[in-house]
Image: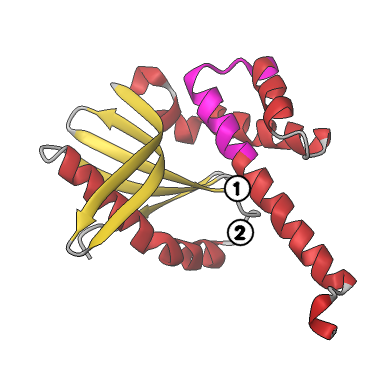
Amino acid sequence: WGDLFVTPSETAVASTSVIAQMRGRAVHRALQLGARAPRWEQIDATLAAEFPALASTLRAACAQEARALIEDDSLREWFDARRYDRAENELPILYRDGEREVYGVIDRLVFRGSEICLLDYKSQAPATAAELASLSARYAAQLRMYASGVQRAWPACTVRALLLFTGNRQVAEIALGE
């Protein structure tokens, strides 16, 4: 019978995990909308409609986090349309790598001349420098697979892969070709 019941601490962890996932999706959605046309009142309304289970204060915090990223001077090269040729958000990618299919959704691609910057948003809580290095290593294989697919689609371009940690507005570039 013990396996049929969940302890309060297990329930809290599961609940926290679900909220963290919803929060991450809300930050991603706010970035997607804000990067196209930063009309923050409309973005707040969209988040309320799409994420009704999130508390209004948490939705507002997600929108504010996205706004802080988009308006951060150090990140303008990826969010200010005057600084690039074009950008795509939530771009699905599918290709074969030997016997396996690689599928994913790229958070943002920014095209500038013959360079393409692939951005993958990570919305976990703000991390220290050491934690950022560890998290970057953890996501490196995923970004390399995405970059390989982008390189196949645009072989004449140079591809860069970047992790954008939304909680503390830090960028980590992933070395490709390893």
Q: Quadrant of the C terminus?
A: bottom left
Circle 1 Cα neighbour tier, 10 Å, few/some/many (<14 / 14–19 / ≥20): some
Q: Nearer the viewer, residue 122 or 168?
A: 122
Place residue 48 in its image quadrant: top right
Instruction: Locate residue 165, reporting x and y percent.
Output: 53, 49
13 above or below 72? Answer: below
Q: Amino acid at mark 1?
A: Asn
What is the residue that sits farthest to the right in this orientation?
8
Side of 52 relative to 138 (left or right): right
Question: Residue 127 got which mark?
Answer: 2
Gap between marks 1 and 2 measured at Cα: 7 Å
What is the residue that sits farthest to the bottom in this orientation?
2
| Residue 84 showing in the rendered view | no
Side of 64 relative to 152 (left or right): right
Instruction: Locate residue 33, reporting x and y percent.
Output: 54, 24
Residue at x-position 27% and y-position 57%: 101
106 above or below 175? Answer: above
Place residue 99 in its image quadrant: bottom left
Residue at x-position 85% and y-position 75%: 5
Residue at x-position 38% and y-position 48%: 104
Circle 2 Cα neighbour tier, 10 Å, few/some/many (<14 / 14–19 / ≥20): some
| Residue 48 showing in the rendered view | yes
**Considering the numbered disc 2 on the image, is that residue within a helix, a strand or a loop?**
loop
For the record, the magenta segment spans 26-41
* Residue at image mark 1: 168
Question: Residue 95 got which mark?
Answer: none
